[in-house]
Each structure stands twice: as C-alpha cells, then as structure tokens.
Image (spheres, grey):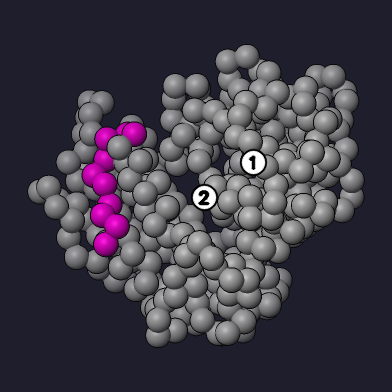
Amino acid sequence: MDLNWSELPFGYFKTDYNLRSYYRDGKWGELEISSSENISIHMAATGLHYGQEAFEGLKAYRGADGKVRLFRWEENAKRMRRSAQGIMMAEVPDELFKKALHRVAKLNARYIPPYGTGSTLYFRPLLFGSGPQVGVKPAEEYLFMIFVTPVGPYFKEGFKPVAIEVVRDFDRAAPLGTGHIKVGGNYAASLRPGHRAHANGFGSVLFLDAKEKKYIDEAGPANFYGIKNNTYITPQSDSILPSITNMSLEQIARDLGLKVERRRVAFDELDSFEEAGACGTAAIISPIGRIYDHDSGKSVDYGPEPGPVSRKLYETLRGIQEGTVEDTHGWTSIIEGI
C-alpha cells in the first residue's frame, strides 16, 4: 500500500474490513466481520422511509510514542444512545460500541496514518432501522455497523482561517426538532446552503436560530465559539448538536486560565470577538477569518492567521490526542496490540 499520508483529503477511502451487528428479537447479535462495502437492506426499511438513522464520528491518533489512542469514545457512545432515544431506535450498549471500535481498528491497522502526517483514522459508527414498516412507526430490527477510513484535515486549508457566510433563508433544525441529536436529517437540511456557500467561495456556513434569526446556532457541521476578554464563549441552544470537541475545549480553556460561557450568542455580538472558530471531531478547530452577511453586505474580519488563543487550544487538544501533552482528565484510551 502506497499512500501519501500528508496529502490525504477528508473523504472515503476503502479499507479492508467493517463490522456489523443486528438487533433482532430484542437483543444484539455478535459482531460480524465483512470485507464488503455493500449492505443488503429490505426495501421497506424504516431507515430508508422514515429517517430512523443516526451516526457518529471519532478518530484514532498514532502518537509520537507509536501508541494508538482513541479520544473520549465513551462520549460518542453516549451521544449515539441519545440519538437512538430521540428517534426510537434500539440503543447500542457501551460494551458493543467499544468492542467494535477496537476490533475494526486492529483489522485495519495498516491504514492508521503515522504520527506527524496530520492525518488520522476516522471511525464512522452507523445505526439505522433495517426492519420493514409501511406506516410511520419504529422498526423491530436494527443494524449497527462501523467502518474506518484514513483522513486528512476536514478543511483543505488545514489550521488556517476560513471564510464563512451567514445563512438566513435556510434552517438547519427546528427549536424542538432533532438538532440536538446526530441524525442524518439534520445534515440533509444543510446540504443546499452548504453547496451554495462553496459555490460562492466560502468554506462553510453560519446558521442562525430558526425562530428569531437573532442568535448563532451552528457553523455548518461544527459548533461555533468566540474569544473575547479572556473568555471562551459558545452558543447555548436546544437545536445545537453537543460537540465532544467543544466540551473538551471548554475544559482546556479553563485549564489555560480562561473563563467559559455557554449562553445565547447574538449575531450582533460577532464584531466584538477577538477570535472566532468552528470546532468538531472532523476539523478539531477551524479558525474563522471572515464572516460575510449577504443581507447587509457587511463582513466581520478576524484576520488572516489563527488567533493566539485558538492556536493554544488547538495545540493542547491535538497534543492530548497524540500523547505529547499530559492527559490530566483521562480522555484518551490506548488500543493495545497495534
């Protein structure tokens, strides 16, 4: 296998094996190893018709010491359970989730990028209703599966500021809808505005709240944060997906001596921030260089380089994930034997 690890995009790359487990007759079956990229699915499966589908994303990092670390996988397992509860699917137990992560990593160990390349092994756990229903009700059968792929940075710029545009004519999720869980419908709703933003030369979008269009919601596929007055500020909303990366950055910010505020953040507050960024598993941190508002024709500029606080947050979190910074909170776990 000849891969240029440092030039990998954030995209799908075929690996050797994936794992699958079916929920039937009220219980989960054993993990099955498959080398096929395809799934045989009933044409009346609820995942196809009624949106019973949820997924997760997490990474394994090859450290400077050669060890492979998972980052806060328990939080991903917990979030997938919340997603399952939200749309009435069978919940995946932590034991099954962990076993699948470790086994699929070992089966595809040759695809784990080396330390220092900027690339990682990305895990995609997937859960959906595989049982048939005609009529809007939950399935009686579910499929949990997990595949991996080596990936580079989510934004092609890497850790460089990106320009994003404000979206007012689309909503990502309703206030009492499914925005707080990681289900596919939320991402389907973001496709058209995201495509338009890319066509207009922007890296991503900034969604405002669906009810009043006054408050910041999400930054495309990531959470938003802003820095001012030695404070890390991130929006509080029932329609925002709770980001494990954002939660971690809040703690790191406290460790670095910053105050932390999770609250409603008015759009009009943007020009008071000294730095701004988007954070999530895929990008870790993507500094925001400019936010453009089509309605007013105005933009807020944060500069062509990452701010000092964003850089320190990024370097600390990445260091913890790769084992070069002490993990004082017990966030990482080592996958033995690879």
Number of dots carrying numbers: 2
Q: Nearer the viewer, residue 195 or 62?
A: 62
State the extent of the magenta-drawn residues as a range: 86-95
Q: Is residue 204 left or right of residue 337?
A: right
Q: Nearer the viewer, residue 43 or 12?
A: 12
Q: Is residue 22 left or right of residue 50?
A: left
Cα gap from disc 1 to disc 2, whole angstroms: 16 Å
The residue that label 1 is drawn on is 260
From this viewpoint, which residue is outermost toward the front? Answer: 257
Q: Is 92 in the magenta? A: yes
The residue that label 2 is drawn on is 244
Q: Residue at x 19, y 65 (%)?
A: 30
Percent of width and height locating residue 192: 62, 33
Q: Residue at x 67, y 63 (%)?
A: 316
Percent of width and height locating residue 232: 69, 42
Amino acid type, mark 2: Ile
